[in-house]
Image: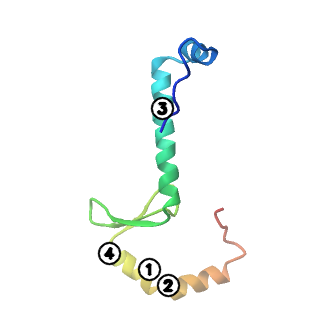
Amino acid sequence: MSAAAPPFGSPAHLLIAVVMTDDQTTELERLKAENDRLKRTASRGITLKVSEKGGMSVYGLGRFPVTLYKEQWEKLLDMADELRAFIRENAAALKTKS
């Protein structure tokens, strides 16, 4: 959702008209829309999706999705206790993302 343009002839309108080209204005609007979309996506939490190649993608953990095939997810899930133990044992060396 973009803000309304300043009134024609106002100092703000003249500043925008002088400083920004049409390409720059278009790019700015595109970036604002992308930023709004990313903010909405980030607030939804973790989501799951089947990828084009048949893998399962987990979105919301970081910038990129984590995608593995079914048998890879099953192997990881079977190791859940080992993964938790490893995290506990290496807590001092592991970093957290804030």
* Disc sitting over residue 84 in the figure: none
| Residue that badge 1 annotates | 76
**Quarter of the figure with the C terminus:** bottom right
Say whether disc 4 or disc 2 marks the residue closer to the N-terminus: 4
Task: For the residues labelled 4 and 2, say whether their Cβ atoms are less than 8 Å apart.
Answer: no
Q: Do callouts 1 and 2 mark residues in contact (Cβ within 8 Å)? A: yes
The residue pinned by badge 2 equals 80
The disc placed on residue 29 is: 3
Mark closest to the chain's N terminus, 4 or 3: 3
The tag on residue 70 is 4
Q: Identify whether 6 is placed above or below 95.
A: above
Q: What residue type is labelled 2?
A: Ala
Give the residue drawn at x 51%, y 30%: 28
Q: What residue type is labelled 1?
A: Leu
Q: Is mark 1 on a helix, strand or loop?
A: helix
Q: How many marks?
A: 4
Amino acid marked by disc 3 = Glu
